Image: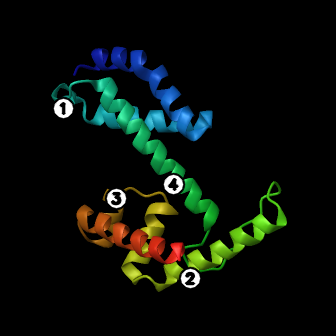
Amino acid sequence: MEQKAFEIEIQRIRPHLINEAEQLLKDGEEAEDVVQDTILKLWTMRDRLDEYRSMEGLAVVMVRRLALNQMRTITVRKLWSGKKDNEDKSLTPDAELSPEEQLVMQEQDGQLKALISQLPDKQQAILRMKHLDGMETEQIAQLAGCSEAAVRQNLSRARRQIWKCFKR
């Protein structure tokens, strides 16, 4: 796809993409960031866009997935705000939460930290890079010296283990 055609198509679908992102994220700035990331990804794959039935459909799916990833990242950061060097850092209680809710969040914070510390070292590191540092799978794979599939598998195993234990 030529640059001019790409720009015209983006101008046409951009309002729809922003609307989708805002519905999920409830934050205009976050939505704008997600849409910008989507446009950048579409630009990098512009040579292959003709393979898809609808660029708009592809863009909407990308926005939704990026927005959901952003929501997960925000949720994890709210639940657990650990540092790279294993320094203990507790959640800062939100003024809007009742004392009971703050206590529950602190307990969940402690449980989550304990569960993560029980994971194998590689899974711990990959989980932290993905959810706390916000790194992409490709970057993690390069740093960890493994394939992207291995990173995804480690993330899946770590999340599954934490989820299974956290539900108990």
Observer-side mark, 2 or 3, equals: 2
Q: Residues within 10 Å of mark 4 (few under 14, many from 20)?
A: few
- Residue extending farthest to the left is 51
Given this view, does label 3 or label 4 mark the residue nearer the observer? 4
- Number of the front mark, 1 or 4: 4
Residue type at mark 1 is Arg
4 relative to 83, above or below: above
Q: Position of residue 168 (x, y in %)?
A: 53, 77
Residue at mark 3: 137
Alpha carbon separation for disc pair 3 and 4: 15 Å
Which residue was labeled with disc 4?
72
| Label 2 sits on residue | 114
Residue 102 placement (x, y as % from top left): 77, 67
- For image coordinates 31% across by 57% down, the residue present is 138
Q: Residues within 10 Å of mark 3 (few under 14, many from 20)?
A: some
Q: Which residue is mark 1?
A: 48
- Disc 2 + disc 3, Cβ < 8 Å: no
- The residue under label 2 is which amino acid type? Ala
Going 37% across and 67% down the picture, which residue do you hit?
155
Q: Is residue 26 left or right of residue 163?
A: right
Residue 112, compared with residue 139, is above or below; it is: below
Mark before the other along the chain sequence, 2 or 4: 4
Image colouring: rainbow
- Pair 1/2: label in front: 2
Q: Which circle's residue, 1 or 2, is located before the other in the chain?
A: 1
| Frontmost residue, 108 versus 3 | 108
